[in-house]
Amino acid sequence: MNVEERRALLARCKGVRVTDWHDAMDALGLFDRGLMEPQIQPLWRDIEDFEHCIVGFAFTLRYVPSSRTIVARSAEDSRKQEGAWYGAEPRWSAELQEGDVLVMDGTGTRDTGYVGSNNAMGWLSRGAVGVVTNNGVRDTDELIKQQVPVYCNGFSRGIIPGRVELASYQRPVECGGVYVQPGDLVVADGDGVIVIPVERIEDALAIAKDIQEGDQKGRARLYGQLGIPFDFTLGAATEQTE
């Protein structure tokens, strides 16, 4: 897909809930396919505007424990070696596209924060819309303050040098019990994360939208009965009910 096609598809997918996609996958006979483990949760939630919710295309990375170490004679020497460690990694961030979701597999690694307040903002500046990882993240206070959409299974404190190294990027990974290929659709909200295989996006989207619209109509009627002010979660149902 070119840039315009990606934008158009994401616009059609925006606002469709994880549960709607999950029900759509069931309807296609793909029971529990793509649904990540519930331990992978949003780092923060915005209950006013749902800014923590993301939808985008998977940009995959896989990190593994490293056999290399940093042996330094001084703090200055250590910092130099840390810089060289980062410098030896591929400049994959230059390949990020608008609408990408970083899906990071850190299986088997411990207490290493691949995601922090600085690099995450850099990825967003390149067009990424959020991060999903089966590991922890660091600088969590700042990530929440900056409202960087992150889905993870906890927090980590360590830096990458001396601990892990990048094994691959833009290759298939396992994250949260799900096989994720580059370009798959990643949807995340307060109910967790689901991945829709790229070849099933259109089929699943049509069903998910129908399910969502039925839910919105039913809730709009109940909002009216209960005297609750309409909100954006009801979509076009607010116009049909007024």
Image (tube, grey):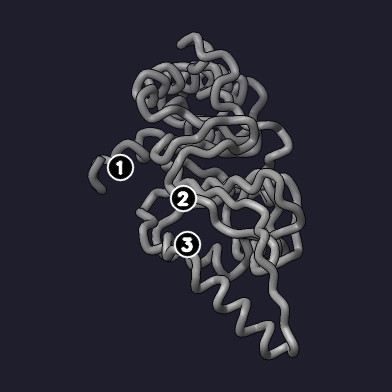
Q: Quadrant of residue 78?
A: bottom right
Cβ–Cβ under 8 Å for marks 2 and 1: no
Q: Residue at x 55, y 63 (%)?
A: 120
- Please tell me which residue lies in front, 239 or 61: 61
> Of callouts 2 and 1, which one flags the residue occurring earlier in the amino acid sequence?
1
The residue pinned by badge 3 equals 123
Instruction: Find the distance from the CA under tag 2 to the CA under tag 1.
Output: 20 Å
Residue 114 placement (x, y as % from top left)? 62, 59
Looking at the image, residue 141 lies above or below residue 33 = below
Identify which residue, 114 or 131, lies in the foreground.
Answer: 114
User: The disc labelled 2 sits on which kind of residue?
Assistant: Tyr
The residue identified by callout 1 is 6
Residue at the image point whose x is 42% and y is 40% from the top: 182
Amino acid type, residue under disc 1 in the picture: Arg
- The percent coordinates of residue 4 (x first, y second) are 23, 45
Is residue 232 at least partly visible in the picture? no
Indicate which disc, 1 or 3, sits on the residue closer to the N terminus. 1
Check disc 1 and report its element: helix, strand or loop. Answer: helix
Count of all numbered marks drawn on residues in the image: 3
Q: Nearer the viewer, residue 48 or 144?
A: 144
Residue 164 coordinates in the image, percent (x, y) = 65, 59
Q: Nearer the viewer, mark 3 or mark 2?
A: 2
Identify residue for label 2: 169
Eye-nearest disc, 2 or 1 = 2
Q: Position of residue 226 (x, y in %)?
A: 67, 24
Horizontal side of 84 relative to 238 (left or right) equals right
Could you tell me which secondary element the residue under label 2 belongs to? strand
Residue 34: in sight, yes or no?
yes
> What's under tag 3, amino acid-wise?
Trp
